[in-house]
Image: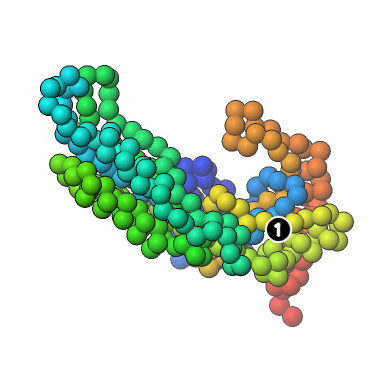
Amino acid sequence: MLLDVDEHTGKFGGARAYLADTRAQRPAGVVIGYPGFEEVVVGDRGLWRATLTVHGPAGHSGSSKSVTGSISRAARLIDLLDQPQLPGPDSRFPLPAKVSVTAISGGSGFSVTPDRIDLNVDVRLTPAFNATDAAACVHGSVRQLDTEMPGPAPTNVSVVASWPPFQLTPKDEPAAAMLRAADSLGVSLATKVAGPSNIGNLLSAHGVPATAGFGVPYEGLHGTDERAHLMELPLVYALHHRAFLDLLKSTSPA
């Protein structure tokens, strides 16, 4: 059992340290204990994340000199990032690729125009739109901005993270064991490919298959009123227990 207290930062320091430790045995599969009572997640979109730094001349907002500031340039870049037509769902993967600007920072007060604005860009990847495609898309928007509205310095793209998408079939372990256990207990359990990424993407990049969920029902996930219904905990435990016994039997030496 791996307990990783670095999960919500997205850094997964515990898991990365484990995977990098040559003394640790590489797991044959991972079942992630996320909540959600009706589905087991067998895949996720990947991600490509970068911080874009947009430059502009600093100055006084009351100056008589007309300049195109970093905020105006950043606004145009956001518009350009919203324009590309990305691949939609297909027979290989049920979700589309997606580009989102998730944070904007820069400037202070009212009388000073800032010399830089930083944008966080999150791109969700699919088999039809990988990390190379994401980088080309973002760099293309950046080149168009710097051509249309030249600044005092080129817009900088600093890549923060990149994980590939992954998807198991219902016949792949450990997904198959979860489904067999559900069937034996009379539980209706569907499979799902999720839009958000999780540590399963990191594990998949290391050749380790993973599922997420079957857990207790929940509401308000990650909200201030996040809550879980514990009445179903015995059934959740029983299903996982049966699935793991099944997996242990199937991997035991003859």
Query: Of 187 and 148, which appears nearest the observer?
Result: 148
Q: Is residue 91 visible?
A: yes
Specify whether 61 is left or right of 195: left
Q: Amino acid at mark 1?
A: Thr
Residue 109 at x, y percent in the picture: 27, 19
The residue sitting at 86% across, 61% down in the picture is: 184
- Please state the total of marks drawn on the protein image: 1
Residue 154, position as x, y percentages in the image: 20, 48
Residue that appears at 35% across and 47% down: 80
Q: Quadrant of the C terminus?
A: bottom right
- Residue 231 location in percent, x, y? 81, 38
| Residue 208 figure quarter | bottom right
The residue shown at (27%, 42%) is 53
Asked whether residue 21 appears in the rendered view, the answer is no
- Judging by the rendered image, the residue that carries numbered circle 1 is 191
In the image, 159 versus 145, the foreground residue is 145
Question: Which image quadrant for residue 209?
Answer: bottom right
Residue sitting at x 27%, y 28%: 107
**How many residues crowd around disc 1 within 10 Å: few (fewer than 14), some, or many (20 or more)?**
many
Q: Is residue 200 above or below residue 156?
A: below
137 on left or right of 209: left
Along the horizontal axis of the image, is 32 left or right of 108?
right
Q: Is residue 159 left or right of residue 170?
A: left
Q: In the figure, 161 relative to 133: above or below?
A: above
Judging depth in this view, the residue of 249 and 121 nearest the camera is: 121
- In the image as oriented, which residue stretches furthest toward the bottom? 254
For mark 1, give the secondary structure: strand
Return the x and y of residue 150 as percentages of the image width and height.
18, 44
- Quarter of the image for the N terminus: give it: bottom right
Name the outermost residue toward the left. 65
